[in-house]
Amino acid sequence: MRHGSDEQPRHVTPPGDAPRVVDQGSVWILVAVPSIWAAHFLLSYWVAAIWCAKAAPMASLVEPRWIIVGLGVIGAAAIAWLGRIAVRRYGGVFVIFEEITESSERGRDRFIGHVTLLLCVLSVVAIIFTVIPGLVFATC
Amino acid sequence: MTDEIDLSRLPPPEPYDEARDKAQRKRLLDVWRAPPGWKIISAVNNDYIGKWYLLTSFAFFTFAGILALLIRVQLAVPNNELFSQSLYNQLFTLHGTAMMFLFAVPIFEAVAILVLPEILGARDLPFPRLSAFGFWCFIIGGVFVCGSIFFGVAPDGGWFMYTPLSSNPDYSGLGADIWLLGLSFIEVSSIAAAVELIVGVLKSRPPGMRLNLMPLYCWYVLVVAGMILFAFPPLIAGDLLLEMERAFGWAFFDPDRGGDPLLWQHLFWIFGHPEVYIIFLPSIALIATMLPTFAGRPMVGHSWIVLSAVGVAFLSFGLWVHHMFTTGLPEISLSFFSAASEAVAVPTGIQIFCFIATMLVSKVRPSVPMLFAGGALAIFVFGGLTGVMVALVPFDWQAHDSYFVVAHLHYTLIGGMLFPLFAGIHYWYPFTTQRKMNDRAGTWSFWLMFGGFNLAFLPMHWTGVMGMPRRVWTYDLTDGWAVLNMVSTLGAFVFAAGFAVLAVNVLWPRGKQPPVARNIWNAGTMEWSAEVPDKPWGIRSIPYIHTRYPLWEQEDLMGQVDRGEWFLPDAQEGKRELIVTDILDARPLFVQRVGGPTFLTLGAAFCLGAAFILATFHLWTITLIFGAGFAGFTLWWLWTGTSRIPETPEKYAGRGLTLPTYAQGNRSPGWWAVFITMTGDMTAFMGLVFSYFFYWTALPGFLPSADRLPGFGWLLAGLALLFGSWAMTVAARGTLGRGQRGLAMALLVGALPIGALGIGAWIWAAWTQGLDPTAQSFDAMVWMLILWMGLHLLLNWVMHLYVAARVKFGHCTPEYRADLMNLTLFTHFLALTAVTTFALLAVFPLLMGVGP
């Protein structure tokens, strides 16, 4: 697919960057995984802040607690889905000692898949970190 | 889908011919040579700019270090009255400000500008003149901010400039304005450097260097520059709000007028906490680059380090409130940030474990750089552990604003940033100067600094726990802090002595010494392929890279590069040329011509600096004159230096590869630079959006009654007109592509009055309802959002006229229309800003039930 922003003076060359980065779906997955953590974190913060500011100061946290848990589950599920893509499409494997130094498009994909899987684990851990205080606190 | 040029099956190089080699070298030398004599200041090459940047940053470091010593002298004995309290406030504020803004962040840019192109095997970064512009902005702004102390008007509100102390001119004088405007100016140069470095890493890699083969240093640079893009703009937004309150009395931080001083703390720390990692990661990157050299093997867990860099970059944005644990936010909010502060220790720890693993599986060669790296890890881990302590809310309530925090932050910054940097200086000194530093002096400086540092800062943990508040001017003998403070002061001077040894070691004239051997450390990364003595062209020919450590794993690479067997070995057209490659696989895309030495960037930086400095003194007329000067120089620079239509559409790059000489849209570095800059710009705008919602959350009466809201109809009409203006620009791109030059110009110029009517409708909507920015925070916020849009439209108009003129004079043609493509991209972001502003001003009050 040619994008409006990829019309070159002479149409002899293969597609440029944006088509590959967007259509081939290559690097976005690296950013997407921690972005889910970020979205979850900000949503949790906003839910709690607005709840505490707009409800009574010592409002019970029972309801937002379940919202935060629900958000946590959704976030973890989204990350698991991306992890699946990292394995299926990118050929990512979870190994400790990696040597993905092959000079090919497949090698690059496998490397991105590997880093993505690692980021999935980190992001899920960070989401769990965020959910825990939501379970513990009973008041603002 | 793969349209790849198979770089591993290129035709063999032409046989070596000494005469050809000599002729090529001469032509390259002529093109890349720096201007002679005093004209050297017009140089833009990364060798020069990088070196100047580095030396200037260290000059500011020395200055801020001397301030630190003065602070320590004042605190050495109880009831000391050596400095007045007012001067003392200026000393610690300027110490923190200069160390953070004039040393820690710029030194990252300095090192990256110096070594990144060489590590990438590139001739230069894609925008050398932008680097030069950033450097000159930095030095002008830095001298202005630091110089203020000699006139007794240095900022004195602490390096985080909390409101309401800083927003009320009765409490804070000129110093706060100097801080706000001087630093905003320097932030501009940081963002310029970030754009340059991101595009550099993404687009200037040598052919074949795919993402999985990219050196770790480049990953760190990419991540950190990305962080700058999301961390600095909120502070610029905050600076703008604070300066509007100080200069024009707009109600943002004054509780009596519906403002909130806490907003500043949010905006500052959304910048301020990621900034700590912006400082730390590039230095860790230096260790990650030199450790494989001394271990003699590739880094263990390459992907894990990439993971930790990306992970830290994200998590570090979820920590800002841990600086605000004592401000009375709901405990549940605090606990989220406490949890994130603990979580960030995970990826930070991973990279340290990777380093340790690399050292364990190999036999590390002892050397001065490794000595500093080892000391860095020891100090940093200690500081990291106290960081985990203060991340816990109850502990922080006890330690907040005490010397415990001072000790913690110096352990993390000096261990995480300064010592790795000193390691890097010893490591890359031979690369920069072709001489070697004295090892004996290096060892001395290390032990003096390591010992002095611990002597100075370890006792502060105790003084803090014993109750000594940070920034306190003096104390009484009965407080019981006297002995520990005296020890800290002694330690500070030992540390300073160590730094003096290092400084002498660096600056010692070594002109007569023989140059070092090539690749003196037997490293694997490309920067060590540089010839000795050094040549100005960066690299003789740009090689094909298919390994992570090319000098180790690609046989005779240096020889092939030297003999000009790879790409662009010549400069027949007398132009400075780089190969631009693609983001994923570094496929060669085109040959980019970059600008050479020029005084235009200097002129632009000087005028912009003057405008910022004069604005501090509220001299608006001269400020505007210099602002116009800045615009003039910049347009001149762009007109003569960018998007030049090449003399031939393609050129032969060597080894059977013919590449276009022009690119536009998403394969050109310029397009990506616009995209990245505007992402930063949107982040600043998001800072304003955050402020709006912050007020709404924190202040019950923020949204006024319906009769005080800007008129919905006018807002909608304004949005429609702004959209029309955007659509005309997009249409101009298409029409020019179809060869209708006249129509394209008409659309470009016609978009101006349409946009003007749009913003006019918005101003009218607010004006007729009598919204007064000095009366209420809501009114101030509305006017600020309209002002933001208006300023962007103003810039948009200049760009429209510029592109229309480019079309008129044949620099932007139906075939070669990079300028117009970049402008279209800019207006996409503008349209997004308009929609968001409309949502905030018209839709949100409606949703909250206060609309008409």
Image (cartoon, rainbow, N blue to C red):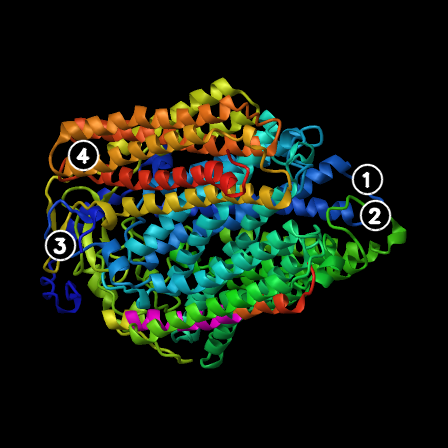
Residue type at mark 2 is Tyr
Q: CA distance from mark 3 to mark 1?
A: 73 Å
The spot of residue B296 in percent (x, y) is 40, 75
Which residue in the protein does label 4 denote?
Answer: B812
Image quarter where the C terminus of chain A lies is bottom right
Dot 4: element: loop
Which residue in the protein does label 2 denote?
Answer: B475
Mark 3 chain: A
Which residue in the protein does label 1 denote?
Answer: B81
Above/below status of B696 relative to B394 = above
Q: Quadrant of residue A132?
A: bottom right
Residue at x 76% of width, y 59% of height: B398
Above/below status of B24 relative to B9 = above
Left or right, B93 with respect to B276, comes to right
The spot of residue B34 in percent (x, y) is 31, 41
Marks 1 and 3: in contact by CB < 8 Å? no
Q: Between B703 and B280, which is closer to the camera in this rendering?
A: B703
